[in-house]
């Protein structure tokens, strides 16, 4: 880390929430790391948020509670916050600043890196082209995650988004290549933090996990730092260590709320919903750190999870996230109310890079065609369900009633799985074929004839002998 300057400043004008305003500074730059010594000898740390002539606004990582402006000594490091990086992070559990909470020693390494990261030269970016299999059937089958992609999960309060995030973190693989997970929890309750540690214990013990947990009662500045520490660790594991790294960040709405709190303390002019006007560029500075670099091993894939306040997808956080990322996985109350986990809305979910990472030579040759046919049939089933609400099932044709049976089979046999169930891609696609066989062959127009013949799809599908067509057995 950069050495501390010889000068210590004692002229702290005021403490404002998580901020300290220091007067009379000279040669101090933005984002510089700061050491604050209290009268008792306790040391706290911070980052320079703003410099105006001889004034420096410092955001204190441990908060300003219990600090007396008259008894403070402030020293500047002359450079940004840096952390050790390397494989020593694997298997460790730390707080949002990277300090161990597992009873072990601090993380040591020969290499240090600035938490702000270095932007990837767009010319050297390599297009994502290989899958990250999560073991969650609905995700792998319909919204395949690709190495180097940023694919957010949109949820609402009360849905099991944390369970889904930890399940993906526990199960995800890059087939036979070195793979690691960095899990960054932000604003978690203590029971939620304990749940995450328990759910990921096996992966941590295997030396494949870095766990950063910021709880709701931790300082707000730490919450802003947590995803940056996570991405800095991931970048070194990937681009120097040659690993494929999945970074799971839950909950990015808590991160944005922390950003709004600091912005209000600084007295900045608010934008939409009182969030700072730079929310878009701040989120982009995190999400765009993922990817693959030409000529270097490894990749960084980002799965941010965010809760939409009041379920509003036009809220600034999901809205701006959607502009930056490459698709979304949407969880809904309607699916959750039907007792299905994960409560994913397949028609609202999308992976824009799926065609780059799925199909022949990557997953299975029938993958893309089966996914397209499932979504097309599901869209028709939704139309039929709306029609049934108007005219009743007695007014539906036999084919329409078969679509209602398909909709139920899709949820129960394809989407639904246990939160501890690791589902292989072959199992997922075979389930998809079983669900599709509840429909007549003539309705499967997006699947080529050779695939239909190879999977034994007949014109009279399973259970079609019933007069009302609803007896199909998924």
Image: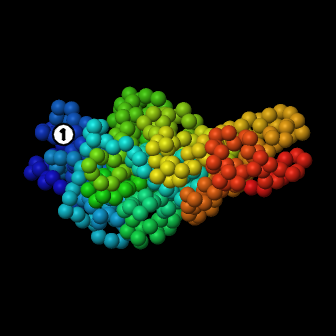
Position of residue 385 measured from the top left corner of the image (x, y, whole percent): 77, 39
**The quadrant where residue 89 appears:** bottom left
Quick one: which residue is furthest to the left in this view?
Answer: 6
Asked if one can make out residue 252 in the rendered structure from this viewpoint, the answer is: no
Judging by the rendered image, the residue that carries numbered circle 1 is 29
Residue 108: which quarter of the image? bottom left
- Of residue 41 and residue 145, the one placed in the foreground of this image is 145
Q: Is residue 243 left or right of residue 413?
A: left
Q: How is the image coloured?
A: rainbow
Residue 455 % position (x, y): 67, 54
Near-viewer residue (80 or 20): 80
In the rendering, at what x and y percent does residue 354 appear? Answer: 49, 44
Q: Is residue 418 left or right of residue 68?
A: right
Q: Secondary structure at mark 1?
A: loop
Query: Is residue 321 visible from the viewing direction of this image?
Result: yes
User: Badge 1, how many Cα within 10 Å: few under 14, some, many 20+?
Assistant: some
* Quarter of the N terminus within the rendering: bottom left
Q: Residue at x 53, y 53 (%)?
A: 364
Against 206, residue 342 (above or below) is: above
């Amino acid at each position: 880390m950069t050495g501390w300057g010889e000068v210590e400043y004692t002229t702290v004008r005021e403490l404002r929430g998580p901020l300290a305003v220091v007067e009379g500074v000279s040669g101090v730059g933005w984002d510089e790391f700061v050491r604050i010594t209290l009268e008792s000898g306790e040391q706290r740390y911070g980052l320079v948020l703003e410099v105006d002539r001889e004034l420096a606004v410092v955001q204190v990582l441990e908060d300003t509670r219990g600090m007396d402006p008259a008894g403070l000594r402030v020293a500047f490091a002359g450079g940004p916050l840096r952390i050790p990086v390397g494989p020593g992070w694997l298997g460790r559990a730390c707080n949002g600043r990277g300090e161990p909470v597992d009873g072990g020693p601090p993380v040591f390494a020969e290499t240090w890196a600035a938490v702000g990261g270095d932007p990837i030269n767009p010319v050297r970016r390599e297009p994502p082209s290989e899958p990250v299999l999560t073991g969650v059937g609905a995700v792998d089958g319909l919204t395949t995650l690709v190495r180097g992609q940023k694919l957010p999960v949109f949820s609402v309060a009360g849905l099991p988004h944390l369970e889904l995030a930890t399940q993906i973190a526990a199960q995800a693989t890059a087939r036979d290549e070195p793979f690691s997970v960095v899990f960054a929890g932000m604003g978690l309750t203590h029971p939620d933090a304990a749940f995450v540690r328990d759910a990921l214990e096996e992966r941590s013990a295997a030396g494949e996990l870095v766990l950063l947990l910021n709880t709701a009662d931790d300082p707000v500045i730490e919450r802003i730092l947590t995803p940056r520490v996570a991405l800095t660790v991931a970048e070194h594991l990937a681009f120097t260590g040659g690993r494929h790294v999945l970074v799971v960040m839950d909950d990015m709405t808590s991160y944005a709320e922390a950003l709004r709190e600091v912005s209000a303390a600084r007295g900045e002019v608010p934008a939409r919903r009182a969030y700072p006007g730079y929310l878009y560029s701040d989120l982009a500075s995190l999400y765009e750190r993922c990817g693959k670099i030409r000529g270097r091993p490894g990749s960084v894939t980002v799965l941010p999870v965010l809760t939409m306040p009041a379920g509003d997808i036009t809220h600034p956080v999901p809205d701006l996230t959607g502009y930056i990322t490459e698709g979304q996985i949407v969880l809904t109350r309607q699916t959750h109310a039907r007792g299905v986990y994960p409560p994913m809305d397949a028609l609202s979910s999308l992976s824009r890079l799926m065609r780059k990472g799925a199909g022949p030579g990557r997953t299975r040759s029938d993958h893309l065609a089966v996914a397209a046919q499932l979504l097309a049939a599901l869209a028709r089933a939704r139309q039929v369900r709306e029609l049934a609400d108007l005219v009743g099932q007695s007014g539906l044709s036999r084919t329409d009633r078969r679509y209602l049976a398909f909709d139920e089979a899709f949820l129960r046999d394809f989407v639904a799985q246990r939160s501890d169930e690791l589902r292989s891609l072959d199992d997922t696609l075979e389930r998809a074929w079983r669900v599709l066989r509840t429909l007549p062959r003539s309705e499967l127009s997006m699947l080529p004839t050779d695939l239909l013949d190879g999977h034994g799809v007949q014109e009279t599908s399973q259970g079609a002998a019933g007069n009302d067509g609803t007896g199909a057995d998924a």
